[in-house]
Image (cartoon, rainbow, N blue to C red):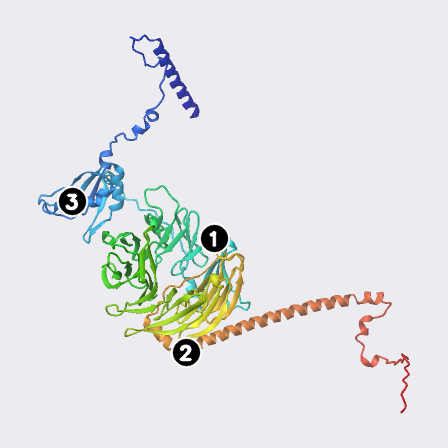
Amino acid sequence: MAAEKGERESRRQKRSESSVDNHIDYDDDEEPDFSDPEDYVDDISDEDLLGDLLKNKPKDTDSIDNVIIVDNIPVVGQERLPKLQNVIKKIYEKFGRIVNDFYPMGSDEKTKGYLFIEYSNPQSALDAVKSTNGYKLDKAHTFAVNLFSDYDKFEHVPDDWEPPQAKPYKDLGNLRYWLQDPDCFDHYSVIYEGGEKTAIFQNTVHLSSVREPTKVEERARWTETYVRWSPQGTYLATLHQKGIALWGGPKFDQIMRFSHPGVQLIDFSPCERFLITFSPVPVKSEEPQSIVIFDIRTGQRKRGFNCESHAQATWPIFKWSSDGKFFARLAPDTLSVYETNTFRLLDNKSLKIEGIRDFSWSPSDNYLAYWVPEQNNIPARVTIISMPARAEMCVRNLFNVADCRMHWQKNGDFLCVKVDRYSKARKAEDTGQWKYSGIYYNFELFRIREKQIPVDKVECKENVLAFAWEPTGNKFAFIHGENPRISVSFYIVRPQGKVDSLKTFERRTANHLFWSPTGQFIVLAGLRNMNGVLEFIDTADMTVMAQTEHFMATDVEWDPTGRYVITGVSWWGHKVDNGYWLWSFQGRLLQKQQLDRFCQLLWRPRPPTLLSVEEIKEIKKNLKKYSQRFEAQDRLRQSTVSTEILEKRRQLMLDYERYRQQMEDEFLSGKQRRIALRDGVDTDELDNLPDDEYDEEVVEFLLKVEEIILDEE
């Protein structure tokens, strides 16, 4: 190819020189001759000379590739046609310039339920088809959109239908096999050696005679960054440069792969149907690639989104409803709610909420809470709406608000809005931002289950460091004050509109609160710069069960049953003393596990219980009866462990006796040689003679003569 181009350039140069020479030889009155020589052959194609122009060369299909057909539009008469045209135009003009549109009319002077739209270029028509096919105009009209050129393809569909090849069934095994363990042992994942190794352990510490967990699976370089369990523990997700892999089953086989180059962050829908991935790597594609939502079961890409700059710092960008039917994202003055049936905006429109700052879904119902700051002498407000009806359930006006944080109780019974209030506020001239002074705090407590959602208020004058609800109860705790005068207060939300203080623990070293998943028990932790101080508290009677520490601890994790707590020093946070410790819920240390460059530990979640509320109450009522059975099983396990120890000792004794017999036989086999070497004396028998065969002889020796002179009186 290079030689060919060189030859062409040489020919062009010769032609140019020839033309110049010809021009020099011509007289002023004679016109120059620009024709090629007789022996010249022009082998330069039109594509080489006019490539840019030929791209816009008209094609036979251009006239129909620009046209789309929109079916299932409303059937209206002439009097309502202009309004329908305006609605359709608003939907489709954002994809490109519309050259023409045509609404076929029937004999009754009404539209036939479809129209033709012509764009200025085929790409606009293609974008319109991709974005609006399946668009829900209202409850009775959902658009079916196709290119006009597709009808030629549909007209030539073969008469003989060939069924698609069925894919062979792949048995993935029981993806929830660990729930069938009769002893209810939980799993947890561990990343260590700086990420080089990832292992899955079974928590059998209290049963093993060596007090060690059981290793279920271990692999080298299983993930390139970190791992994450799905919300119900079915899948283990690993992150790689090219995308995500999901693992599960008894052998942790690969379930599915999802391609998303440069992926850094992931999230799951609560129902484990969808996987959300984020990658900052730019990819040339017609569809958005920053955020992608995949169907976990099929691996299908459901939809992609762009990541605006204002949302990059907060993950997850999308927040899900408890049933996984809706997900929402925040934009300036806009709250966009999508439905997973179509992955389009709910009712084809976003909620326009001027100044909206944050929102949060209820963990148990399709309720959505959001707050809006003060604007133009209009007070700030917290609003709770039900979805998909968008009906307001409660509105709470707030004054002198600097910031708000929303905290849902796990069962969705209560919502706490921590309100940062100010005494004075001024606007900075250089930055235009508001600066507040005299900050104090209020807890606005919404009783979601009660009629008209009454709201209680708890005030705190000190700085609030942390807040946490009891997951399955009606108590909450918060840390307040400044070091070294840090306190932890506990409150209870009682019926009939009462909120009572239970107790305040003063002068505590804590900056995090970790409730047991089953409630009642809580760990007060002073992590990172507080040297890993731990305090285990029983909130039933507000007693401190244990005060201890795990020096420089960075993480605290409860197991799903609320029986064990793990504290760890991650290599990602500190480079020394990496490892994790296992504690009982009472604060008793069960195990210390030091691991080289330990990075991450995550308990495997459990799905929600299948028992009803009444069945759970019945179990709690008869807990003593069940306790006797479990205590008997524990004693049996202990006896089993004792039997194992005795069996081990017996085997060691047998090995010792076998070795001793072997040595005695070897000793006896060399007896004759020893007698010969010792001049016929059997020294082996000297130590074995009975006492009556010995002659005793007493020999006396004079050792010393000593003379002592006594004084006479």
Q: What residue does disc 2 label?
A: 624
- Tally the numbered discs: 3
Which dot marks residue 386? none
Q: What residue does disc 1 label?
A: 222
**Amino acid at the residue labelled 3:** Gln
Q: What residue does disc 3 label?
A: 85
Write the residue at 25% across / 56% down: 375
- Left or right of 492 on screen, residue 711: right
Camera-near label (3 vs 1) is 3
Q: Looking at the picture, does residue 711 appear above or below residue 11?
A: below
Q: Residues within 10 Å of mark 3 (few under 14, many from 20)?
A: few
- Left or right of 142 on screen, residue 110: left
Q: Identify the residue at the far bottom of this view.
A: 713
The quarter of the rendered structure image containing the N terminus is top left
Give the distance between the C-alpha atoms of the residues marked 3 and 1, in whole angstroms: 56 Å
Q: Give coordinates of residue 109: x percent, y percent.
A: 9, 44
In terms of depth relative to the viewer, which is nearer, 441 or 548? 441
Q: Give coordinates of residue 276: x percent, y percent.
A: 36, 53
In terms of depth relative to the viewer, which is nearer, 512 or 368? 512
Write the residue at 82% across / 65% down: 673
| Whether residue 323 can be seen here | no
| Whether residue 32 can be seen here | yes
- Whether label 3 touches label 1, CB < 8 Å: no
N-terminal-most mark, 1 or 2: 1
Give the distance between the C-alpha atoms of the residues marked 1 and 2, in whole angstroms: 45 Å
Q: Residues within 10 Å of mark 2 (few under 14, many from 20)?
A: few
Disc 2 on helix, strand or loop? helix
- Whether label 2 touches label 3, CB < 8 Å: no
